[in-house]
Image: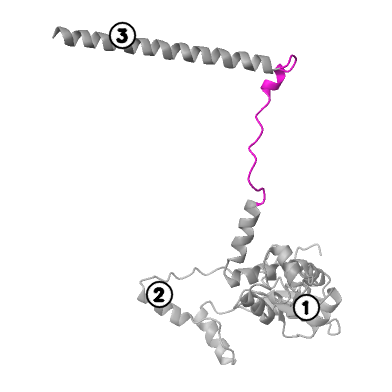
Amino acid sequence: MTSLNESLNKFKKQQEKCQSTLTSIAARAGSSRATNNQKSAPAGTSSANSKSPAPAVKFSNDTERYQHINSIRKAPVGAQIKRVIDLLLETRQAFTPEQIKEACHVDVNANKAVFDSLRKNPKVNYDGRCFSYKSKHDLKDKNQLLVLVRKFPEGIAVIDLKDAYPNVMEDLQALRAAGQIWLLSNFDSQEDIAYPNDPRVPIKVDDDLKQLFRGIELPRDMIDIEKDLQKNGMKPATNTAKRRAMAQVHGISQKPKPKKKKHEISKRTKLTNAHLPELFQSLNIPGSLM
């Protein structure tokens, strides 16, 4: 037992000695490092210590760009074609395959599927060397736009004109403001339709006829309106009877609409035919200053 205690005491002393040795070594290393820094730093350069460290140099500054280009060229064919068509639509210029590659990173020559799809696309024109955008109607300015609209007395969809040239929508509004065309919404598709306003056919409507037009009272029930349309050989756009039957099947109650009082035309009356302002320009409204 005595020998064991002696061994433990001896071991503790060795640990204490090792610990003190390590401490002294660390202290000497720290003091020598501080001395070296002071010697290497010239006088008057203490402000240099306040400077931020230099940023780490990347292996390649173009890494992200190369990854972006690689993702474009590995994208589906449809996505690459859309990218090229968007470029042609925005610039309205002709591009060679090399110029397309430089502008939007789509390698047309290296991808046969993209090349063939572009060549056959109805929105793209290919002359054997360059690709360019092809609109449905080849128009250059407002005068050509007006000539085209006048060729369609039954109306032409605005959606077919939107890509004719860059500022075509502004020209449509200008023609409308000048009274040369009408822009009306189609009841079925809710799309705008451009109609020509032929100046050779001026229409003058008497005030009596305008008042008669406004004084006609339509049937209150949509079913009666649909029957009147059918009697006159016109197909109604709605089928109220069918809609009501379906509503009853699904348990939706049909609340009768309260009858509105008939009001005479006044300066506060909202004209439902506001899209035909020339019909009401000379209308004599009681109490109006016109």
Q: Tell me, yes or no, whether the two marked residues, 1 and 2, touch with CB atoms within 8 Å.
A: no
Q: Earlier in the sequence, mark 1 or mark 2?
A: 1
User: Could you say which is closer to the camera, residue 234 or residue 15?
Assistant: 15
Give residue 118's position: percent from left, percent from top.
Answer: 67, 77
Amino acid carrying label 2: it is Ala
Q: Nearer the viewer, residue 76 or 221?
A: 76
Q: Where is residue 215 shown, x and y percent of the image? A: 66, 77
Between label 1 and label 2, give the one nearer the viewer.
1
Q: What residue is at 56 percent from the left and 92 percent from the top?
A: 231
- Does the image show residue 203? no
Assess disc 3: are there few (<14), some (14-19) or many (≥20) residues with their C-alpha within 10 Å of its C-alpha. few
Residue topped by disc 2: 247
Label 1 and label 3: CA atoms lie apart by 92 Å
Q: Is residue 148 above or below residue 20?
A: below
| Residue 45 on the magenta span | yes
What amino acid is found at the position of numbered circle 3 in the picture? Lys
For disc 3, the marked residue is 13
